[in-house]
Amino acid sequence: MDANSSMRNLNDNEKQTMKKMKALHIAEKRLLWELIKQTNKDGIAIYNGSINDLQFLINKNLIVINTWYTGKGNSIIVLPTSQTLIRKLQN
């Protein structure tokens, strides 16, 4: 199965998320892609930069800050409403 056919199998919510992702500027896409690559099986990544750098992704609901996390760095829930999409992007 190729990438295009697997993306056609997304639900409506994940298709909307994909549209938001495609509309990002290149620097925003790069940052989101780095977070996606770092994301664990639970959809969480640790970001060591400033939360201000992530504000545009937060505003578009592509990421959410995990406020329960108390460790080093910032715990980010990546694509919180599109876990199937994130798994497909990681493969």
Image (cartoon, helix red, strand yellow):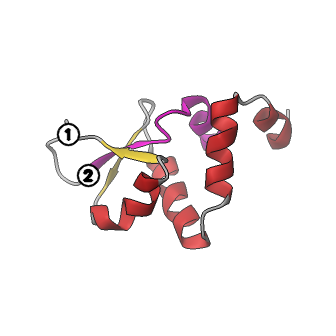
Q: Is residue 12 left or right of residue 78?
A: right
Which residue bears the numbered disc 2?
A: 74
| Residue beneath the point at 47% across and 46% down | 61
Q: Amino acid at mark 1?
A: Tyr
* Magenta-drawn stretch contains 32: no
Answer with the quarter of the image where residue 12 lies: top right
Which residue bears the numbered disc 1?
A: 69
x and y, in percent, of residue 20 in the image = 62, 52
x and y, in percent, of residue 30 in the image = 55, 65
The 10 Å Cα crowd at callout 2, few under 14, some 14 to 19, many 20 or more, is: some
x and y, in percent, of residue 80 in the image = 46, 36
Instruction: Identify the magenta region.
Output: 74-91
Q: In terms of depth relative to the viewer, which is nearer, 4 or 25? A: 25
x and y, in percent, of residue 90 in the image = 60, 42
* Magenta-drawn stretch contains 85: yes
For marks 2 and 1, give the CA distance.
Answer: 8 Å
Do we see residue 57 in this rendering? yes
